[in-house]
Amino acid sequence: MKNFAFLLIFFLLCSCTNVQKQESSIIKNDLVVPEGYTHNPFKKYIPENQIEQNFITDLKVFEIATNNLDYDKIVELYYPDYFLYLGQVLSINSLDETKKKFKEYLQENLESNNKKFTDHWEKAEKSGVYVTNIINRVKEKDGILYLYEFHEVLYSENDSIFEIEPTYGVAASLNNGEKWYSCSSTDDEELFEILGYSFSKNSIEKVLSK
């Protein structure tokens, strides 16, 4: 459903990944690594200040909630303006009813969506995001936008592997960097509409420029 195309930032953003990667693998140190992944981690981004640390922390909290299928927590952590957008698209006037619809969609789709990515590697138990850079930073009043680079990471009990090609995501804070939301979408038009509730077109264009 296009109405929910914004769903699950990192995972849908990575959905262009070839699900056939496991067919061709590389063996390193007795670890079978699917084509397109590496066992060697990239240089992890080190936050330069408390605002960036808050971003990294909040991204991790969301990742944990997603892997744990904690639907209530995901709704709580989701970007607030998304529900304004979704309510408008679905013609729902009640914020609570909009969040209820979104939670129902998560319950129907999240588990299978998570599995789509762990299926790339037979040992994978969960997937996540490994941030390697913050490329753009845009400040507008109390709001901040980041464009960040990350690699999909798949975790097993004892190992982790990293997607070689980077992906890019957008994160937003509405209170000067105290709390962060990941706001990436596979649909640029939708992303502009959602971010447009709190940010100007100029700010959105600046953060998306590479």
Image: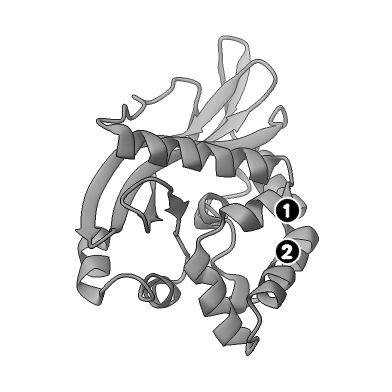
Which of the labelled discs sits on residue 86, or is there none? none
Tags 2 and 1 in contact by the CB under 8 Å rule? Answer: yes
- Depth order, front residue of 54/152: 54
Q: Position of residue 174 (x, y in %)?
A: 37, 58
Q: Is residue 203 left or right of residue 91?
A: left
Classify 23 as above or below 201: above
Classify 157 as above or below 144: above
Query: Which residue does the numbered mark 2 point to in the structure image?
Result: 103
- Depth order, front residue of 53/171: 53
Q: Position of residue 7 (x, y in %)?
A: 59, 62
Residue located at (30% from left, 56% from top): 145
* Helix, strand or loop status at disc 1: helix
Q: Position of residue 35 (x, y in %)?
A: 53, 35
Residue located at (73% from left, 64% from top): 103
Q: Is residue 127 left or right of residue 202?
A: right
How crowded pointer 2 is (Cα within 10 Å; few <14, some 14-19, many 20+) is rated as some
Question: What amino acid type is highlighted by mark number 1?
Answer: Tyr
Q: Is residue 27 left or right of residue 47?
A: right
Furthest toward the bottom, the residue is 91
* Helix, strand or loop status at disc 2: helix
- Which label's residue is closer to the chain start, 2 or 1? 1
Query: Which residue does the numbered mark 1 point to in the structure image?
Result: 71
- Depth order, front residue of 193/110: 193
Furthest toward the top, the residue is 29
Quadrant assignment for the N terminus: bottom right
